[in-house]
């Protein structure tokens, strides 16, 4: 949902089939093998259970219909192909309809390790496994409905809730700290950093605290928030979240724990 993209999404044919090149399938295969190894002992059980249900192919990018065949019976969700960039209105509308947007392009080799835009690997490997879990799915659905009805100013606060849960959420499990956020799970560097590093601050999840915490998309996160159970997200979805947004707006933002982004010199 950034302003410009060098990537162009593939469009499906009349049968809903997306024709990926051999090189694109090879990039998927290499990303899968690397990340499956990287998340061992770090991803939460709910994510791993969902990944098992999805049974993602190792040798090719899955077709969206294959993902939907698992998601729809599990939680009523489905994935929907979108261009590389969509508006916030479209994003919230899709989530409110239990449709998770998947930009149908895959990163180039030049950006194999990191890209700012969510590609098909990030969306499917990072997010779809968790969408098989009812509590996570309900939280995401509620978030979409709230965002669709919210003002532009309130959406800025809601974006932080999405960022620190769906993208970069951590979980205190019986086996120790685990990851459920797709932004971490699809990134080898962030996976190691979020669990294995002493650098970031890990805070107990509090909705108003989350809504007041600034973030940057192009750095390792200085702050993560931890829940104790994926079911905590269902409990959050039942709260008056827009009242909490107003509370956060009244209190104001916390001071950022990162330097400002350097402006490019033209």
Image (cartoon, helix red, strand yellow):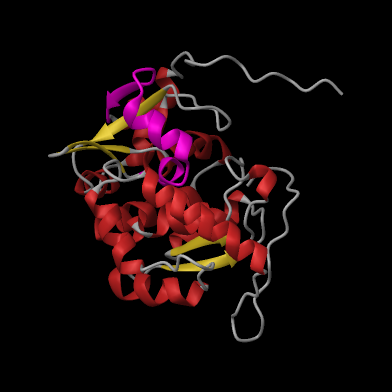
Q: Give the range drawn in magenta.
A: 181-205
Asked whether, in this view, residue 233 is left or right of residue 150, the answer is left
Asked whether, in this view, residue 87 is left or right of residue 6, the answer is left
Q: Nearer the viewer, residue 36 or 53?
A: 36
Q: Does the magenta stretch include residue 262?
A: no
From where the camera sits, is residue 40 visible? yes
Where residue 91 sits in the image (x, y, percent)?
55, 55
Count of numbered labels shown in the rendering: 0
Where residue 203 sits in the image (x, y, percent)?
29, 24
Q: From this viewpoint, which residue is outermost toward the bottom?
A: 15
Quarter of the picture holding the C terminus: top right
Where residue 23 sits in the image (x, y, percent)?
66, 63
> In percent of the image, x 33 and y 28: which residue is there?
196
Where residue 260 sits in the image (x, y, percent)?
61, 16
Quarter occupied by residue 40: top left
> In percent of the image, x 24 and y 53: which residue is there?
46
> In percent of the image, x 55 and y 35: which residue is there?
153
Does residue 169 sit above or below 120 in this rendering? above
> In percent of the image, x 50 and y 67: which residue is there?
59
Quarter occupied by residue 104: bottom right
Q: From this viewpoint, which residue is outermost toward the left?
A: 174
From where the camera sits, is residue 133 visible? no
Does residue 122 sit above or below 52 in this rendering? above
Q: Which of 85 and 222 is in front in this view?
A: 222
Does residue 137 sit above or below 198 in this rendering? below
Does residue 261 sit above or below 230 in this rendering? above
Q: Does the magenta stretch include residue 182?
A: yes
Q: Which of 144 and 44 is in front in this view?
A: 44
């Amino acid at each position: 949902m950034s302003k410009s993209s060098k990537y162009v999404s593939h469009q499906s044919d009349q049968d809903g089939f997306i024709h990926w090149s051999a090189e694109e399938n090879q990039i998927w295969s290499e990303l899968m093998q690397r990340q499956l190894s990287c998340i061992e002992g770090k991803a939460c059980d709910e994510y791993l259970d969902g990944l098992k249900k999805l049974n993602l192919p190792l040798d090719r990018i899955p077709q969206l219909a294959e993902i939907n065949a698992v998601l729809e019976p599990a939680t009523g969700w489905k994935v929907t192909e979108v261009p590389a960039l969509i508006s916030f209105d479209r994003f919230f509308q899709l989530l409110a309809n239990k449709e998770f947007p998947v930009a149908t392009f895959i990163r180039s080799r030049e950006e194999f390790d990191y890209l700012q835009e969510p590609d098909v690997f990030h969306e499917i490997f990072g997010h779809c496994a968790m969408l098989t879990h009812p509590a996570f799915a309900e939280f995401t659905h509620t978030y979409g409905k709230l965002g669709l009805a919210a003002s532009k100013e309130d959406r800025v606060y809601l974006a932080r809730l999405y960022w620190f849960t769906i993208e970069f959420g951590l979980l205190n499990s019986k086996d120790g700290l685990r990851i459920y956020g797709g932004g971490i799970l699809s990134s080898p560097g962030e996976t190691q950093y979020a669990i294995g590093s002493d650098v970031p601050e890990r805070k107990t999840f509090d909705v108003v605290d989350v809504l007041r915490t600034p973030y940057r998309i192009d750095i390792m996160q200085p702050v993560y928030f931890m829940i104790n159970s994926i079911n905590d997200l269902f409990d959050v979805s039942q709260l008056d979240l827009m009242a909490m947004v107003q509370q956060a707006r009244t209190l104001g933002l916390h001071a950022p724990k990162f330097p400002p982004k350097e402006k490019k010199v033209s």
